[in-house]
């Protein structure tokens, strides 16, 4: 694992001064003395912004004072953020971090941070090499460790075998003559996209992360509360990269019993290991039956000086055609790159989704939604790409899955925290997903697009169809970006 601070925000005046010196050329001793006094830290931004509410001086003067008195700024941050409880001050400090060689399994809790940004190595576009995380949990058990290595090696061989078969399959299915074209590359990438379903969750990946100090503090504590050694190591590594540059912004990194024990005790007291499959892959479990009327009400309220109840009474007297005309006006000038109006947030939709690890890797990027994910389990079955079935490798694929499942069962009780490393991208779990309609439009626009990966596209389409069944006109917005103008 490699965790390295890549950058952070600093006061522009420091940067401007340094640029002037570089233009000047030869630096005098006075210049060097001034540079030595520079403190390259985002803490001065946080401290100066914290004073805005109680100090009438211009912000540039507050920043200058913070730059010149960094230790004073740090004391101010500590007082305001941790003693007075104004944690939002830490949000003015932003850090970029390189995270290299972590498992796909640990990338999941990492990327659940709602107010952070991530870009991860894609198994759709990059051919995966034999790079596997070795769990520390297995290191004192040579028999289990060797078996883990043997099975993961077998999965890599299966990945190569499947990929080799799928390349000519997709070339024949989508013939492209120009091997230098983007279209040809896209066709070849389809083989990577489907072969990855046999890769284990212990496969190594890398992530670029950007977040503010408040988010990092919460993330570090969450990772530290995990039973996985790798997650604890990652949390500690992130903290070590940040703390020397911003010691006044991150303080509470040790998890509480609330964070470490709550789910364990619920699991112990109420054993729910039945792994009952839901009736359908996607289930709409709750939705607002009056959403369209409420939406029209909100649009009228926004466009006038009337109260919500006044607008509601007006809507109650309208015909369906009148309501539809207001809806049409609300999207009349909408472009494919526009978000729908904020009034569309007034209705929330709840789903249960039985989802593969592959598709969840994409669903979890919709972090503004509420996602409660259950545990992966072999009893929930696997998703097998149709292409693998078409080239006659279904039985071969299932043979590997059977071996994986047997090893999972073998280590389940002895190493419950590390058991998921051996599971594959094809394995599934249940996810509770709640979002407002505006977020659902965004999800469908992105995930139902023809360029989207087929697994998550199928799920998004099922979600959209279930919602469309319940309403008269808003379903028109639940389309992929490529279908936006046509529909």
Image: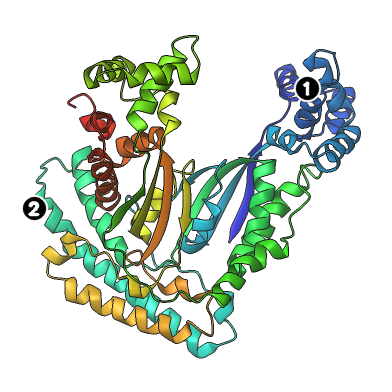
Q: CA distance from mark 1 to mark 2?
A: 64 Å
The spot of residue 455 in percent (x, y) is 27, 53
Asked if residue 338 can be seen in this view, the reply is: no
Q: Is residue 35 left or right of residue 302?
A: right
The spot of residue 63 in percent (x, y) is 80, 22
Quarter occupied by residue 199 = bottom left
Display colour scheme? rainbow
Mark 2 Cα within 10 Å, few/some/many (few <14, many 20+)? few
Asked if residue 111 can be seen in this view, the reply is: yes
Question: Looking at the image, which residue is at 46% across and 9% down?
Answer: 304
Of residue 430 and residue 289, the one placed in the foreground of this image is 289
- Of tags 1 and 2, the one toward the viewer is 2
Direction top: furthest residue: 305
Looking at the figure, which quarter contains the C terminus?
A: top left
Question: Looking at the image, which residue is at 50% across and 77% down?
Answer: 271
First-in-chain label (1 vs 2):
1
The spot of residue 459 in percent (x, y) is 28, 50
Q: Secondary structure at mark 1?
A: loop
Disc assigned to residue 26 = 1
Mark 1 Cα within 10 Å, few/some/many (few <14, many 20+)? few
Disc assigned to residue 51 = none
Q: Secondary structure at mark 2?
A: helix
Q: Is residue 312 left or right of residue 159?
A: right
Q: Are marks 1 and 2 in contact (CB under 8 Å)?
A: no
Of residue 464 and residue 142, the one placed in the foreground of this image is 464
Quarter occupied by residue 318 = top left
Disc assigned to residue 172 = 2
The spot of residue 240 in percent (x, y) is 72, 54
Of residue 356 and residue 295, the one placed in the foreground of this image is 295
Of residue 306 and residue 268, the one placed in the foreground of this image is 306
Q: Is residue 69 left or right of residue 307?
A: right
Picture layout, residue 349 above or below residue 387: above
């Amino acid at each position: 694992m490699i965790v390295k601070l890549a950058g952070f925000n600093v006061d522009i005046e420091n940067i401007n001064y340094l640029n002037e010196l570089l233009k000047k050329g030869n630096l005098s001793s006075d210049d060097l003395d001034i540079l030595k006094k520079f403190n390259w830290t985002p803490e001065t931004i946080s401290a100066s912004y914290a004073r805005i509410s109680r100090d009438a001086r211009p912000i540039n003067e507050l920043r200058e004072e913070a730059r010149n008195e960094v230790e004073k700024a740090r004391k101010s941050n500590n007082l305001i953020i941790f003693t007075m409880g104004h944690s939002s001050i830490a949000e003015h400090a932003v850090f970029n971090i390189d995270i290299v060689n972590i498992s796909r399994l640990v990338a999941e809790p990492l990327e659940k941070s709602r107010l952070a940004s991530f870009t991860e190595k894609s198994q759709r576009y990059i051919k995966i090499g034999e790079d596997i995380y070795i769990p520390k949990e297995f290191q004192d058990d040579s028999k289990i460790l060797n078996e883990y290595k043997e099975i993961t090696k077998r999965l890599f061989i299966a990945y190569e075998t499947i990929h080799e078969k799928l390349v000519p399959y997709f070339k024949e299915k989508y013939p492209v003559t120009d091997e230098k074209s983007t279209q040809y590359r896209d066709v070849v990438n389809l083989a990577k996209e489907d072969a990855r379903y046999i890769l284990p969750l212990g496969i190594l990946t890398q992530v670029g992360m950007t977040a503010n100090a408040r988010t990092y503090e919460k993330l570090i504590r969450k990772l530290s509360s995990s039973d996985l050694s790798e997650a604890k190591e990652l949390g500690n590594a992130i903290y070590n990269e940040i703390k020397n540059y911003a010691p006044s912004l991150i303080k509470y990194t040790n998890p509480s019993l609330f964070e470490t024990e709550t789910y364990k005790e619920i699991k112990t007291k109420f054993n729910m290991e039945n792994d009952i499959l839901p009736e359908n892959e996607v289930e709409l479990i709750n939705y607002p039956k009056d959403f369209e009327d409420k939406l029209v009400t909100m649009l009228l309220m926004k466009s006038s000086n009337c109260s919500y109840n006044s607008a509601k009474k007006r809507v109650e007297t309208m015909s369906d055609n009148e309501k539809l005309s207001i809806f049409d006006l609300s999207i009349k000038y909408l472009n494919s790159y526009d978000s729908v109006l904020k009034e569309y947030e007034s209705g929330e939709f709840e789903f249960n989704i039985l989802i593969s690890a592959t598709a969840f890797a994409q669903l979890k990027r919709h972090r503004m939604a509420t996602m409660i994910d259950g545990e992966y389990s072999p009893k929930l079955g696997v998703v097998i790409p149709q292409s693998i079935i078409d080239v006659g490798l279904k039985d071969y694929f299932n043979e590997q899955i059977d071996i994986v499942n047997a090893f999972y069962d073998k280590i389940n009780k002895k190493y419950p925290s590390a058991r998921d490393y051996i599971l594959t991208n094809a394995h599934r779990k249940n996810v509770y997903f709640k979002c407002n309609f505006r977020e659902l439009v965004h999800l469908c626009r992105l995930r139902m697009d023809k360029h989207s990966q087929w697994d998550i596209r199928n799920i998004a389409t099922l979600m959209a169809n279930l919602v469309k069944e319940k309403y008269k006109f808003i379903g028109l917005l639940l389309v992929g970006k490529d279908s936006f103008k046509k529909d």
